[in-house]
Amino acid sequence: MTTSGVPDRTAPATTARTVAQAKINLFLRVLAREASGYHQLETLFCRLELGDDVVVRTDVRNRSLDASGDVIPPAGLGPVDRNLAWRAAEAFAKATGWPNAWAIEIRKRIPVGGGLGGGSADAGAVLRCLNAISPAPLPTHALLALAASLGADVPFLSMDEPVALGWGRGERLLPVPVLPARAVVLACFPFGVSTPDAYRWLDDARDSFSPEAAVLELDRLGSWARIAQLAHNDFEAVVAPRFAAIATTLNEWRSHIDRIGDPEGIALLAGSGATVFLLSDRVPSALHDAPEPSPRIVRTSTATRVVAVEVSD
């Protein structure tokens, strides 16, 4: 039985599985820093078909997390208690009093530390899975509030919409009409960009900051051509100059968009990096000016739906 909400069942289900889909930001603006140190954001989230397989079981006596996959760095994913999927399960248990134990299995396909929201997607998948088999599931607003405590990307990746406008700390979301799928190429570098460092670089680059006045018209989010006109990532101004491989890839892919005259083409840094993505229906076969270190090229597409949660005994 599959569901994106709460399943009808006569016996309690103990296992839930889904695909934790990666995300890209079709535009990303970093606004003022709060006194707390957090930054306000304005972004257009879009899920990809690329995702991690996530299984959550509650018919166990202990708590465990097992992650596998060839995208995991040689040093691993770090301490379990800092893993976002683990923290999501802990947060759900603390908020609802259930479950006491769990086994989380993740098959990683989303490159780690590249700005594609892989850890946040896993956390969102765990929240959705637990809610689907919970004896007392949380309403949507409560689940998203719980997700917001884990990070700015987690609320979007806990909801059942493939595209949404997000602002604040990512906890305020407005679903927008789903657009036709577009091919996406990811240049995944063998290094990451520290998100705290990227924010610090951005703050240091802004002697004084007052957000520009802007009006976001929803009808401008209704076509790829109009979204391409809005495409922007504030982090590029401080990340690309520090990483020649990122700058080279952005320049090449933007030149490709210009050469083919694609009014719907978008080439941007993913989140705070280091992955660079190209969204175009006419994608190049390879990077001609191969940067060093060379990236792993991953091909996927934008998603037109959120993969449902499947539950079983």
Image: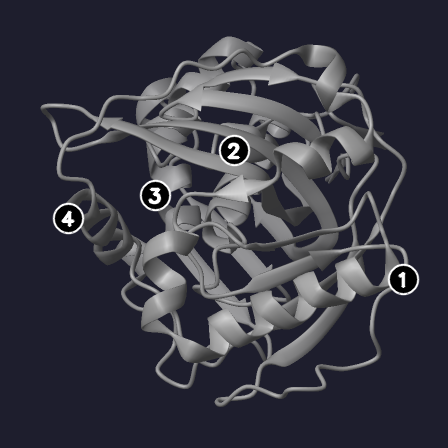
Between the residue at mark 3 and the residue at mark 4, the CA separation in whole angstroms equals 31 Å
Q: What residue is drawn where x is 58% and y is 22%? A: 165
Q: Position of residue 293 (x, y in %)?
A: 48, 89
Q: Is residue 168 above or below residue 307?
A: above
Check whether the beta carbons of the residues at disc 1 and disc 4 lie within 8 A of each other: no
Which three-letter amino acid code belongs to the residue tagged 2?
A: Leu
Q: What residue is drawn where x is 44% and y is 21%? A: 167
| Relative depth, front residue between 198 and 86 | 198
Check whether the beta carbons of the residues at disc 3 and disc 1 lie within 8 A of each other: no
Q: What residue is drawn where x is 21% and y is 28%? A: 209
Residue on which disc 3 sits:
87
| Relative depth, front residue between 79 and 303 | 303
Quarter holding the N terminus is top right
Residue 127 bears which disc, if any? 2
Comes first in the chain, label 1 or label 2: 2
Judged from the image, the secondary structure of the residue bearing numbered disc 4 is: helix
Classify residue 195 by image quadrant: bottom left
| Relative depth, front residue between 117 and 284 | 284
Between the residue at mark 1 and the residue at mark 4, the CA separation in whole angstroms equals 38 Å
Judged from the image, the secondary structure of the residue bearing numbered disc 1 is: loop
Comes first in the chain, label 1 or label 4: 4
Between the residue at mark 3 and the residue at mark 1, the CA separation in whole angstroms equals 40 Å
Which three-letter amino acid code belongs to the residue tagged 4?
A: Asp
Q: Is residue 5 above or below residue 239?
A: above
Between the residue at mark 2 and the residue at mark 3, the CA separation in whole angstroms equals 10 Å
Residue 282 bears which disc, if any? 1
Comes first in the chain, label 3 or label 1: 3
Residue on which disc 4 sits:
204
